[in-house]
Amino acid sequence: ELRGKFKEELVSLLNENRKELSELAVAKVTGGAASKIAKIKSVRKNIARILTVHNQQQKDAIRKASAGQKYISKDLRLKKTRAIRRALSKKEASAKTLKQTKMDSHFPM
């Protein structure tokens, strides 16, 4: 249900949940009802859900805006693994030095 909402709606929901969380925190300190103290966890989870959806929407928008450009920002690039990112490309791996190409041409196997 959150994914269908626009940015403004998400931000307003986030503010409402944060306000509710602060009220619940006050209730906890002042010795409020057990039901209020138990509700803190669910409100925190709701805030996390809203932020997750908001951040994903932002990233998708940035991805669409930067599509077709020569360079992609680092946070939008594929992560893969460190070893794969450091490995030689196919072109680099198959490249031969001048000396090696001469050796291959003069002494074919």
Image (cartoon, helix red, strand yellow):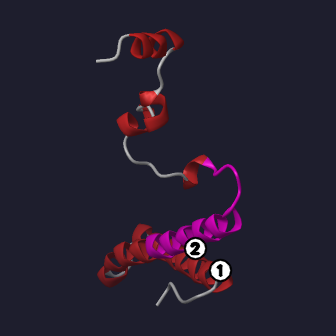
- Give, as a single range, the part of the protein colored magenta: 47-73
Q: Quadrant of the C terminus?
A: top left
Residue nearer the viewer, 87 or 50? 87
**Foreground: disc 1 or disc 2:** 2
Residue 55: say if magenta.
yes
Residue nearer the viewer, 102 or 73? 102
Report x, y in % for residue 100. Answer: 44, 13
Q: Residues within 10 Å of mark 2 (few under 14, many from 20)?
A: some
Q: Is residue 63 found left or right of 39 in the rendered image?
A: right
Q: How many discs mark residues in the rendered view?
A: 2
Relative to 103, is 3 above or below?
below
Q: Secondary structure at mark 1?
A: helix
Q: Main secondary structure of the magenta part?
A: helix
Please tell me which residue is depicted at 59% across the width and 81% down the height of the picture.
Answer: 10
Relative to 12, is 44 above or below?
above
Label 1–label 2 contact, CB within 8 A? yes
Report x, y in % for residue 32. Answer: 38, 78
Please tell me which residue is depicted at 40% across the width and 32% down the height of the picture.
Answer: 87
Q: Secondary structure at mark 2?
A: helix
Q: Which residue is mark 1?
A: 7
Residue type at mark 1: give it: Lys
Residue 4 sits in which quadrant?
bottom right
Please tell me which residue is depicted at 34% across the width and 82% down the height of the picture.
Answer: 33
Report x, y in % for residue 44. Answer: 42, 71
Residue 80: say if magenta.
no
Numbered label attached to residue 57: 2
Report x, y in % for residue 34. Answer: 30, 80
Mark with earlier residue (1, 2): 1
Q: CA distance from mark 1 to mark 2?
A: 8 Å
Residue nearer the viewer, 86 or 63? 86
